[in-house]
Amino acid sequence: MASIVLAVVASCHWGDISFSASSSVPREWTRKDTVDFQLPVLMAGRTFHFVVDVRHTEAYTYRDLWVLLRHNVADSLHWQTDTLRCPLYSEDGYPLGKGLTGLYTVEIPYGTLVSDGSSQAQIQLVHCIADSAVVGISDIGIRIEN
């Protein structure tokens, strides 16, 4: 399985954000291109809100992006996998999210998790669209909020 190198955008405590990171994806993002995020140690027993950020262009040809989100935050020895629907266009075909000049950022709430405080916590993202490769996704990232 190929991995994409993580580009950390911010990893400090700013207000309610505990961790924020983003990674560029290849122009043709395949299901073999897993995006890995190694998380900082999160306080054990504390509840955190997770948000997935998707940056896309109008070259993306589907209304939604479907992503497999795999993590071991609640228990570092056990992995949980969820399918996340990321709506990128309205029913009328207009791009969702914030942005100018053809690049849009959409924030998708994932939910809340209670951390086990492990230094081994990771989140992995990969698209699960029927096509083996998708174009028009520029970056994908995560935010962990208190």
Image: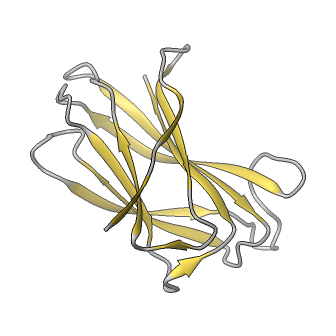
Relative height, residue 134 to residue 79 (above, below):
below
Q: Which one is in front, 100 or 48?
A: 100
Viewed as shown, does residue 139 lie left or right of 4?
right
Q: Which one is in front, 18 or 4?
A: 4
Residue 34 image position (x, y, % from top left): 40, 61
Viewed as shown, does residue 135 lie left or right of 100?
left
- Color scheme of the displayed model: secondary structure
Which residue sits at x=17%, y=30%?
Answer: 116
Q: So how many labels did they put on this image?
A: 0
Viewed as shown, does residue 120 lie left or right of 94?
left
Residue 58 image position (x, y, % from top left): 79, 68
Please identify the quarter of the rendering in which residue 83 is found: bottom left
Q: Quadrant of the C terminus?
A: top left
Residue 82 image position (x, y, % from top left): 33, 61
Relative height, residue 129 to residue 70 (above, below):
below
Residue projecting furthest to the right: 101
Which residue sits at x=24%, y=39%?
Answer: 73
Residue projecting furthest to the bottom: 131
Viewed as shown, does residue 8 lie left or right of 73?
right
Please identify the quarter of the rendering in which residue 70 is found: bottom left
Please identify the quarter of the rendering in which residue 60 is found: bottom right
Q: Quadrant of the N terminus?
A: bottom left
Which residue sits at x=23%, y=30%?
Answer: 115
Q: Which one is in front, 51 or 131?
A: 131
Which residue sits at x=36%, y=38%?
Answer: 112
Q: Which one is in front, 21 or 70?
A: 21
